[in-house]
Amino acid sequence: MTAAAKRRLRMGIKYAIYALAVLLLQDTLLSRLPIAGVHLMLVPVAASCASMWLGAEKGGCLGVAMGTLWALSGAADGGILLLGLTVSCVLGGWLCDAVFQRRLTSALLACAITLLITLTPVLLVRLYLSGGGVRHVALFLRQILLSLLLCPPAYAVGKWLGKAGDSAWTA
Amino acid sequence: MGKKFWTKRVKGILAAALVLAVLVMLGSAVSRSVSAGESIVTTLLAPFRSVVAAFDRTAEQIYGRIFRYDAAIAEAEALRQQVASQEAAVREAETYRRENERLRALLGLAGEHSDYSLQAAYVTAWSASDWSDTITVDQGEAAGLEIGMCAITSSGNVVGLISATGPNWAKITTVYDASSEISAAVSSTGETGVVLGGRGENGEKLLQMRYLSTSAVLRNGDEIVTTGSVLYPRGLLLGTISGAELDETGIDKYAAIDPGFRVDALEQVFFITNYSKD
């Protein structure tokens, strides 16, 4: 195995551990303790923050991997979440490559886009299936705004992973 | 705008995600409970979830010891007074208990629910969705758990039904889930209705007994119990009435129910693996 392949393998393991840790935090702590009546969504925020350092293609791969893991771990509406997460990771990665600088403000915007892309189809499906209305939309917006509170720590971890991975992925 | 967005790789990734999403949706639509992929991933995740949930519980206990000490002291004092005031009631209850035992013996009845076979399990994960209410536990098919088995708390309150299982895990759809509908009765009056789960305007979890007649007599504190069905044994406690009103049609009454437990505070649940259906 070449040195470059070893570095790539090491990075793959790092991101796998990251995805696992994020999923476990989502499943246990954040899902157990709703804030203001809603559950904070760490998985989309963490995927978005990581993909902004990886770019559109590798970010998209991370989105597919995290989305698949999330969907197969028993998340409700897993298929929709998987697709939304991938699209938003690709978009977030591309935006940070081509348009924005990699800063916390860009991360907040990328996370907001990711949460909207990921959760809006779920909201629409649920509204279609079970009715609801303004109060569901209000809860949805509250969930997105409160989930953005997770962005700064996720941004810091994503930055650390991205910087640590620069040499490996580009090798 | 230097970089192109629609590269071949991006198209490939999006196509792969679309295929996977369709497979996931088809898998959950076709299979009775969970798809093979979901079963494998959840089985592999189960030990990790158990460890994290155990850490979470320990951290909460430590937090409680450090920051809730004063509250615990005050609570202990209040409980001491409560115990003192209830001693007389206990003595009276003891008299009734003995009488009850005699009557039971007279009727040839065994102790309440002695026919239940129970399996304990620890809660390891909670649903992140605000649209559904499920929890995952650390016991599964290896411990004899099956889809449709009823979960209760240590005090006998109904938690929900198993909706999916794997070798070392089981998912419970709780009574708060919008899909939950349980035939129930007010134990004191015999009024029957259906207990439904759902969410309130602020996202708070709600449990309501619906389809009660307008003439139904409902008192706060009255117990709501299951009437018995294929899934739920008869006489299981669903909670106590905490309020009652006419529903939006004005034809029926509904009662708000306090189930006697908080899903986010559940540590351990018990499954009724077998019971007499007589």
Image: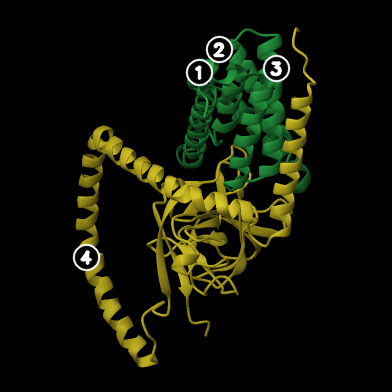
Chain colours: A green, B yellow
Kind of residue at disc 3: Trp
Position of A54 with respect to B273 (left or right) is: right
Position of A164 with respect to B100 (left or right) is: right
Q: Residue at x 59, y 37 (%)?
A: B202
> Which disc number belongs to residue A152?
1
- Labels 1 and 4 in the same subunit: no
> Which disc number belongs to residue B75?
none
> Which disc number belongs to residue A104?
2
- Labels 3 and 1 in the same subunit: yes
Q: Chain of mark 4?
A: B
* Distance of label 3 from label 1 (alpha carbons): 20 Å
- The foreground one among A90 and B9 is B9
Q: Residue at x 49, y 70 (%)?
A: B188
* Distance of label 1 from label 4 (alpha carbons): 57 Å
Residue B191 is situated, as x and y percent measured from the top left of the image, at: 58, 70
Which residue is tagged 3? A94
